[in-house]
Every structure is written in C-alpha cells, then in structure tokens.
Image (cartoon, rainbow, N blue to C red):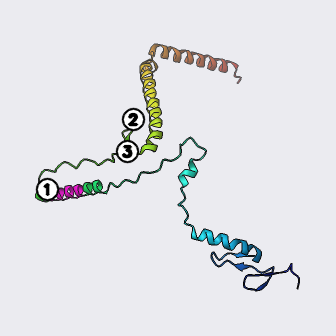
Amino acid sequence: MHALFFFLLENDIIVPAGDLLPCKICGRTFFPAALKKHTPICQKTATKKRKTFDSSRQRAEGTDISTVKPLKPRSNWRRKHEEFIATIRAAKGLDQTLKEGGKLPPPPPPSYDPDYIQCPYCQRRFNENAADRHINFCKEQAARISNKGKLAADAKGKLPARTQVNYNTFFDCLQSKNKKRQMDTDRWRSTEKY
C-alpha cells in the first residue's frame, strides 16, 4: 500500500484519505489528519465556559459612545415589593368606596426609580448613559422650538399688513382691466369683416 492514500489512526485503523471521520465531541466531520489536530482543540473548547456575548459593546466600537460601564448589581426588591403592596391596598380601597358609593380617594403617587435622572426639558426619566445622550438632544430641540416661537410672533405682527385690503386700489385695478378688455373688444369688432 502507498502511504499517501491511507492514514493510520490511534486505534491502528487504516482509513483511505478520501473518507471523512466525525469528531467524537462536536460531531463535525474531518479528514483523518485534520481530525488529529481538531480533537485536542475541540476537547479544550468544550470544557471551557464561554462568556455571554455583549452586542452593545460591539455596536459601541468605533462610535462616540464611551465604553459601557459595568452594571452595579443592586437588589431593590424590598422597595418594589412595598410599592406593589401599596398599589394593591389602594385598588382594594377604591373597590370598597365604589361599592359603598363614597367619594373616590386620591390615586397613589407614581413610583420613580431613584437611579434615573430626570430631563429638565421634557421631564422624562432615563438611566445615566441614556440621560447623557438625551439631555443634549432635548436641549437642542427646546432651543429650536423657542426659535420657532419667536419667528411665529414676527409673522403675527406682519399678518395685518398682508390681510388688510385697500379697496380703492382694488377697484381701480379692476376698472383698468375692464377698460383694457373693452378696448380689445372694440378693436376686434372693427377689424371683423362681414
């Protein structure tokens, strides 16, 4: 037998070079020579735990957005639980007053996450990273809207000048057009042959 066309595997099995063999770990098929290289690498990667992929970090590469700060694991379950209990109690109280026909109690105050930052322009709340981007955007929008208001005030000042009509000038214009039309008609009649 010729050595180029056959390979000797670990278990003394001779396999023709054209046959593919499956990997015992991942199931992919390889030529025997490639399988020898692949097996230890596949074994190593199979035992290693992979980190979860963070797509936001990849999207942020090459942009103005700074690298994402690591999230602080905070447990605020107690506050959320207390808010939930207060909401349930308020709903029960509302049901009871509706059955009795009494005056409706005021609604419970809305709950806000204390970690969120409020936008001074639109009063919405955002986390730290989003607030940095949003507040700059909202500031520009507020400036544009205030400029539009100034332009609108100027336009309101000009409105009476545009809408007031000088009827004398209007009728003079109509009379001159009628005279011209009459002259054209007379000229046409004089050139007409019977």
Earlier-in-chain disc, 1 versus 3? 1
Mark closest to the chain's N terminus, 3 or 2: 3
Which quadrant is home to the N terminus?
A: bottom right
Helix, strand or loop: magenta stretch: helix
Residues packed near mark 1 inside 10 Å, few (<14), some (14 to 19) or many (20 plus): some
Residue 121 is labelled as 2
What range of the chain is rendered magenta? Answer: 85-98
Picture coordinates of residue 53 (x, y %)? 55, 59
Residue 23: quarter of image: bottom right
Q: Amino acid at mark 2?
A: Tyr
Q: Marks 2 and 1, how far apart in space?
A: 38 Å
Q: For residue 92: magenta? A: yes
* 60 and 190: which is toward the camera: 60
Q: At x 43% / y 43%, what residue is drawn? A: 128
At 28% from the left and 53% from the top, the residue drawn is 79
Above or below, 9 against 58 in this view is: below
| Label 3 vs label 2, nearer the camera | 3
Which element carries disc 3, helix, strand or loop?
A: loop
Q: Which residue is mark 3?
A: 116
Q: Could you tell me residue 39's position as x and y percent?
A: 68, 74
Type of residue at label 3? Tyr
Which quadrant would residue 16 be assigned to in this image? bottom right
Going by the image, does 6 lie left or right of 170? right
Label 1 belongs to which residue?
Answer: 97
Q: Quadrant of the C terminus?
A: top right
